[in-house]
Amino acid sequence: MKKKVDLKKKVGILFQPKIQAARDLAQQLARVVGDLDVAVWICSSWEEDRAKEQAGATELIICLGGDGTILRAARIANPQSIPILGVNLGRVGFMTELRAEDALSRVPAFIKGEGWLEERSMLQAELVSADTPPFHALNDVVVGRGERCRLIRITATVDGEPLATYRCDGVILATATGSTGYSLAAGGPILHPLAREILLQPIAAHLSSGTALVLPSDTEVKLEVSTTHAARLSIDGQVEVPLSDGAVVKVGRSPHITRLLRSDRPTSFYETLMQRLGKRE
């Protein structure tokens, strides 16, 4: 869905702290944004709590890094659903919009209202019978084994109906955005980024089906863990929670969305996909 972007009054800049070029560009962009009489704050993407404290009334987050940095930005942007403009200084950058060398010249136009908003679905994961707030993921939710290389048992139910018991390394539940990430590496299909469906992809399933399932957007999935050793819940590969035997994780569509700021000249997803996967001739 295309939504016109209004003039920004307060802008945040998140940078990947391990990339020196991102640090340098953050300072340069702050000066450019400040010259437009717009309030600006800068923060490392690894300092999520500090960034959230500054995010109130922010109308745009400029994200300097790769897709991993955008995943962190998405958690900071919610629940306000602050638009995110991604500048690629990473390896792949499926979700980014600008190249680093273009950022200084093109960001002012976005600040002044150029572009449209692309809305991406997210997942919500809850630990059943645990006193913890829900987690929200832009890419994926994974229930899997811990550090020991031993299979665990995961019993999956879909909307209350039994699906399967997997002996596996884990089960991935992915959004369309996450379909080009871990799920793809595990053999899952690619969904168009604006799709709302949910992917269920077992990881290295032993003597059970390893076939991915594409589920409706309003599906609720429960994953129950049976294990004698460590297991874990992973949110976007960045937030990890240990799971004990008998733990149940409930996953469905999140009430939050991630809004990515795009240019007025949208490129083809399929062309970009082939470029990023390195398969164009």
Image (cartoon, helix red, strand yellow):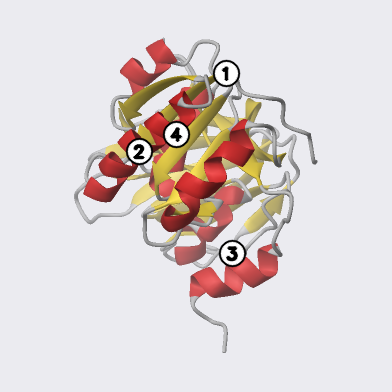
Residue hosting label 2: 28
For label 2, the SS is helix
Residue hosting label 4: 32
- Asked if 148 appears above or below 207 in the picture, the reply is above
User: Nearer the observer, disc 1 or disc 2?
Assistant: 2
Q: Alpha-carbon distance for marks 1 and 2?
A: 28 Å
- In terms of sequence position, does the residue under pointer 3 or pointer 1 come before the other? 1
- In terms of sequence position, does the residue under pointer 2 or pointer 3 come before the other? 2
| Residues at discs 1 and 2 in contact (Cβ within 8 Å) | no
For label 4, the SS is helix
| Residues at discs 2 and 4 in contact (Cβ within 8 Å) | yes
Identify which residue, 50 or 200, lies in the foreground.
50
Residue hosting label 1: 79
- Which residue is at 57% across, 56% downward? 179
- Which residue is at 34% across, 43% downward? 25
Q: Amino acid at mark 1?
A: Pro
Q: Is residue 57 left or right of residue 17?
A: right
Residue hosting label 3: 211
- Which residue is at 53% across, 64% downward? 210
Q: Is residue 12 left or right of residue 174?
A: left
- In terms of sequence position, does the residue under pointer 4 or pointer 3 come before the other? 4
Q: Amino acid at mark 3?
A: Thr
Q: Alpha-carbon distance for marks 3 and 1?
A: 33 Å
Disc 1 packing (10 Å; few <14; some 14–19; many ≥20): few
- Asked if 135 appears above or below 279 in the picture, the reply is above
Q: Alpha-carbon distance for marks 2 and 4?
A: 6 Å
Q: Quadrant of the C terminus?
A: bottom right
Identify which residue, 203 or 139, lies in the foreground.
139
